[in-house]
Amino acid sequence: MISFAAVGLNHNHIYSLTDQLLAAGATLKWVYAQEAELLAAYCAKYPQAQLARSEAEVLEDAQVQLVISAGIPSAHAPLGMRVMQHGKDYLSDKPGFTTLAQLEEARRVQAETGRFYWIYFSERLADKGTTHALALVQAGAIGRVRHVLGMGPHRLNLPARSAWFFQRQHVGGILNDLASHQIDQFLLFTGSSTAQVVSARTANYAHAHYPELEDFGELLLQGDGCTGYARVDWHTPDGLPTWGDGRLFLMGEDGTLEVRKNCDLAGRKGGAHLFLVDKQGVRYIDGSSTPLAFGQQVVADVQQRTQRALRQDHCFTVSELALQAQHMANQQHTQGA
């Protein structure tokens, strides 16, 4: 079994990552972060983690095979390259990169070292409804997918946000951050190895007091015989009992499939609600008992050098498209200013 370490705790995704790896039998050895309050919370939940005195203490430990991180986004890539150069695999929260230059350097280091640089697209990898939908599509339930509509609304929750969250240099923009989830799903559900960003736009509709924040983003994608649209935002109303009414709509040649990821406004409890329509009729599917295999697949990939959890080229392609979409939106904003 493998040993792993957590370095960078700025987003709560670090807990989901840790839980999935522990459930798969991996051993948590180290934790390191510069923020004392974040360390205290993490160690309270995972008392088995040893407090590292420095990042170097983690990277120089030959027993550690995998480093996970949910630090400040702009620090993801520099850490990932140091991890790979120390002969370890790396699993980062999204976004994996905040600039195209970071992405190109990571591609070079990954090719040189042969280590993995994975990105945690949690809206699929930690979502039972989306996992169930992917299995249905791959089994041919709705035929070839020709269009994907993905919506990722989020609650802003201003009191809980740190200063870096409102600084573009640290996040890279809303399309680079949130829409990476929808790009990941578009490629997988359509079977596309790459795509083209047709159009992209961002806006700050309701938070002028945070001038670098984008609270709305949208983009159009063109794949191999398919298209997709993604909308992401920070406008989830406080009255919704979850962080966002995430939805996925798939149009196939033989049917349609909708996933209501986190809640069903019609009244069903919980999340992972699927609605399949084909020639036989309309069918509701409860996906809440769908097992999540990501943790087990990561452990196996680290040990066996396979790519069942995430393909390396897929992670880089999603990141490149997200960065391209953000750049396109930024240019349009500048030209329209």
Image (cartoon, rainbow, N blue to C red):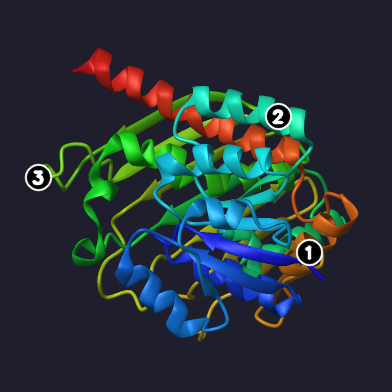
Spatial CA distance of label 1 from label 2 is 27 Å
How many neighbours does mark 3 have within 10 angstroms: few (below 14), some (14-19), or many (20 or more)?
few
Q: Which of marks 1 and 2 is in front?
A: 1
* Residue placed under numbered mark 3 in the picture: 209
Contact between marks 2 and 3 (CB within 8 A): the answer is: no
Measured from the top left, where is residue 105 in percent x and y?
Answer: 59, 25
Q: Name the residue under label 2.
A: 194
Q: In which quarter of the image is the C terminus?
A: top left
The residue pinned by badge 1 equals 299
Which three-letter amino acid code belongs to the residue tagged 2? Thr
Foreground pick, 219 / 88: 88
Q: How far apart are marks 2 and 3 (CA)?
A: 37 Å
Residue type highlighted by circle 3: His
Residue drawn 77% across and 67% down?
A: 2
Q: In this view, does 325 lie to the left or right of 26?
A: left
- For image coordinates 32% across by 43% down, the residue present is 216
* Residue 230, image x, y percentages: 50, 43
Q: Quadrant of residue 314?
A: top right
From what the image shows, is residue 66 above or below residue 87? below
Callout 2 crowding tier (Cα within 10 Å): few <14, some 14–19, many ≥20? some
Among numbered discs 1 and 3, the one appearing first in the sequence? 3
Q: In which quarter of the image is the N terminus?
A: bottom right
Which quarter of the figure has residue 293? bottom right
Residue 85 visible? The answer is yes
Q: Residues within 10 Å of mark 1 (few under 14, many from 20)?
A: many
Mark 1 lies on a secondary structure that is: helix
- Where in the figure is residue 204, as x and y percent of width and height? 22, 40
User: Residue at position x 28%, y 49% from top?
Assistant: 165
Q: How many dots with numbers?
A: 3
- Type of amino acid at the residue the image marks with label 1: Val
In three-dimensional space, the C-alpha distance between marks 1 and 3, rounded to whole angstroms, equals: 44 Å
